[in-house]
Amino acid sequence: MTHEKVKRIVLGTDHAGFLLKESVKKHLIGQGIDVVDCGTFSEEPCDYPVFIKQAAAAVKEYGCPGIIFGGSGNGEAMVANKVPGIRCARCVSEWDAEMGRKHNDAQIMSLGGRVTKPEPANRMVDIFLAAEFEGGRHAKRLKMFPDANC
């Protein structure tokens, strides 16, 4: 599956998500997507908030989607969701990836390198990037979010 509408994507990870990030990165580059990699760049233990805040800021700066990675993806999603105007969906299934975009207009998806294998992750990424926000009743709800920068 190719994503002609997606030209650039931001990636960010900690050490626990590094290998999955590298696999997804290869998948995206193979589709001709420009990847902005905010690190980390090894499995050396690090503090994920540093890299996730940088990735969320880059998503805002470039106006493109992002994917962040960690061990479970939970902490990473929490950090990204603290960045004003960012909505991040932690995805453990294809349905999560699709609904994160269609119903919540998530700009970022969070994946867990310790809970998701590369092949299912690539499918989730493809679904996330292909899905479009449905608007309507969902847009009304997004305006109720605390930061309401949607």
Image (cartoon, rainbow, N blue to C red):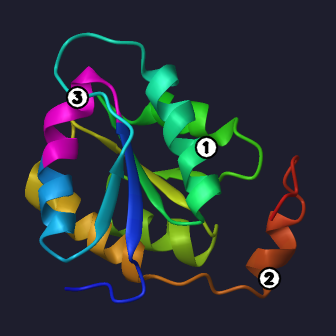
Name the quadrant containing residue 141. Answer: bottom right
| Label 2 – label 1 distance at C-alpha | 28 Å
Secondary structure beneath dot 3 equals loop
Residue 41, numbered label? 3
Depicted 145 relative to depicted 55: above or below? below
Is residue 114 visible in this depiction of the protein? no
To which residue does mark 2 refer? Answer: 137
Residue pictured at 21% horizontal, 76% vertical: 32
Residue 127's x, y, as percent?
33, 76
Secondary structure beneath dot 1 equals helix
- Marks 2 and 3, the one that precedes in the sequence: 3
- Marks 2 and 1, the one that precedes in the sequence: 1
To which residue does mark 1 refer? Answer: 57
Residue situated in front as seen by the camera: 82 or 90: 82
The magenta segment is 13-22
| Label 1 – label 3 distance at C-alpha | 18 Å
Figure quadrant of the C terminus? bottom right
Is residue 71 visible in this depiction of the protein? yes
Residue 112's x, y, as percent?
29, 38
Number of numbered markers: 3
Is 137 magenta? The answer is: no
Depicted 66 relative to depicted 134: above or below? above
Q: Is residue 74 left or right of residue 133?
A: left
Depicted 135 relative to depicted 71: above or below? below
Secondary structure beneath dot 2 equals helix
Q: Residues within 10 Å of mark 3 (few under 14, many from 20)?
A: some
